[in-house]
Image: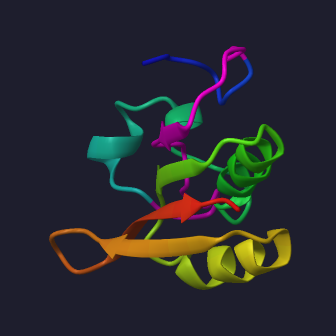
C-alpha cells in the first residue's frame, strides 16, 4: 500500500492502483457545507472535471500496471468510455453508488 501524488512517487512494480481523485467540474455549484470545508484541490478535477481521471488512466497504462479502480463523477461515464476506447484497454466496468448514480470504474489494461 502506497500513498502518493498520482503515481509519481511509486517506483516499484505494482499491479493495481486505486484512486479517489478530484473529479468535479470547475463550474459545478457545490453547497456551502462542502465548499467551505474542503480544499478546492480535493474537489475540482479541471474545467470538465475528468481531466485528472484521464491523466491517471494514461499514466497507469504507460507504467504497465494491470488494474485501475477510480471514483468518478455521476456524469462522466460517456466521456470516459470514449476516452478509454481511444487509449485502448482490455476492459472497463462501471459501477453505481447506493443512490443509483454512476460513481466509479475498474479498468483492466491489456
Q: Nearer the viewer, residue 28 or 14?
A: 14
Q: Nearer the viewer, residue 28 or 49?
A: 49
At 40% from the left and 32% from the top, the residue drawn is 38
73 vs 85, left or right, is left
Q: Quarter of the image holding residue 4?
A: top right
At 47% from the left and 65% from the top, the residue drawn is 73
Query: What's the colour scheme?
Result: rainbow
For the N terminus, give its image quadrant: top left
Q: Residue furthest left?
A: 98
Provide residue 83's location: percent of width, then percent of height.
76, 74
At 66% from the left and 24% from the top, the residue drawn is 13
Q: Quarter of the image holding residue 23?
A: bottom right
Magenta residues (range)? 9-29
Number of marks in the rendered image: 0
For the C terminus, give its image quadrant: bottom right
Q: Nearer the viewer, residue 56 or 22?
A: 56
Residue 39, magenta (yes or no): no
At 66% from the left and 59% from the top, the residue drawn is 109
Overall secondary structure of the magenta section: loop
Provide residue 17's location: percent of width, then percent of height.
53, 38
Q: Quarter of the image holding residue 26?
A: bottom right
Provide residue 39's location: percent of width, then percent of height.
49, 29
Amino acid at each position: 500500500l502506497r500513498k502518493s501524488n498520482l503515481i509519481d512517487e511509486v517506483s516499484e512494480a505494482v499491479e493495481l492502483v486505486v484512486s479517489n481523485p478530484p473529479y468535479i467540474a470547475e463550474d459545478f455549484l457545490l453547497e456551502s457545507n462542502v465548499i467551505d470545508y474542503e480544499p478546492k484541490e480535493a474537489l475540482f478535477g479541471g474545467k470538465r472535471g475528468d481531466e485528472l481521471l484521464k491523466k491517471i488512466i494514461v499514466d497507469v497504462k504507460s507504467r504497465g500496471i494491470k488494474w485501475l479502480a477510480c471514483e468518478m463523477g455521476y456524469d462522466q461515464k460517456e466521456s470516459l468510455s470514449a476516452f478509454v476506447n481511444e487509449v485502448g484497454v482490455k476492459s472497463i466496468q462501471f459501477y453505481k453508488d447506493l443512490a443509483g448514480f454512476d460513481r466509479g470504474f475498474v479498468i483492466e489494461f491489456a
